[in-house]
Image (cartoon, rainbow, N blue to C red):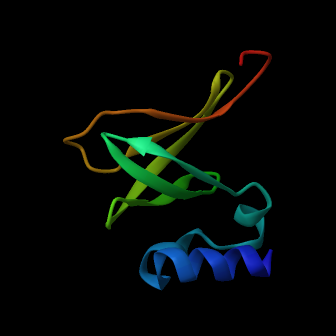
Amino acid sequence: MCEMAKMAIAEYGEKYAESLISEYALRRAFWWDGEWRGKPISCFVTEKKAVCKVGEKMATFYVFDTPQGVYLRPEIKLVDDWIKVAHRGDDS
């Protein structure tokens, strides 16, 4: 878990990643890479928040763990996109 915390801080910086790092949060944390709004996105996802590098910028997202999957929603109120980052059940 220490290595995951160090990697998150190295990738996203202390300002963004420090608040996400606790032993409990790291147990369920995962990395997710994909595309959002035409730009590459790389996220460190914990139980309640995610910090992501979108292109060259940093952004924070709320995390919603639903029966259908894990979704991210930007914290900025002007954008209401939901990003599915993990599946649940037997859907593929």
- Compared with 86, 67 (above or below) is above
Reply above or below: 83 against 33: above
Image coordinates of residue 28 in percent, x first then y, are 76, 54
Furthest-top residue in this view: 91
On screen, residue 41 versus residue 86, left or right, reads: left
The quarter of the rendered structure image containing the C terminus is top right
Q: Residue at x 72, y 73 (%)?
A: 4
Which residue is nearer to you in this view: 80 or 36?
36
Is residue 54 among the parts visible in the rendering?
A: yes
Q: Residue at x 46, y 48 (%)?
A: 62
Q: Is residue 18 visible?
A: no
Residue 42: give x, y in percent of width and height: 50, 57
Q: Is residue 9 left or right of residue 57?
A: right
**Residue ranking furthest to the left:** 78
Question: Horizontal placement of 4 versus 20: left or right?
Answer: right
Figure check: 66 above or below 42: above
- In this figure, what is the number of numbered marks? 0
Q: Residue at x 78, y 20 (%)?
A: 89
Quadrant housing residue 73: top left
The quadrant the N terminus occupies is bottom right
User: Residue 78: which quarter of the image?
Assistant: top left
In percent of width and height, residue 25 lies at 70, 62
Residue 47, position in %: x, y? 64, 52
| Residue at the image point whose x is 42% and y is 81% from the top | 15
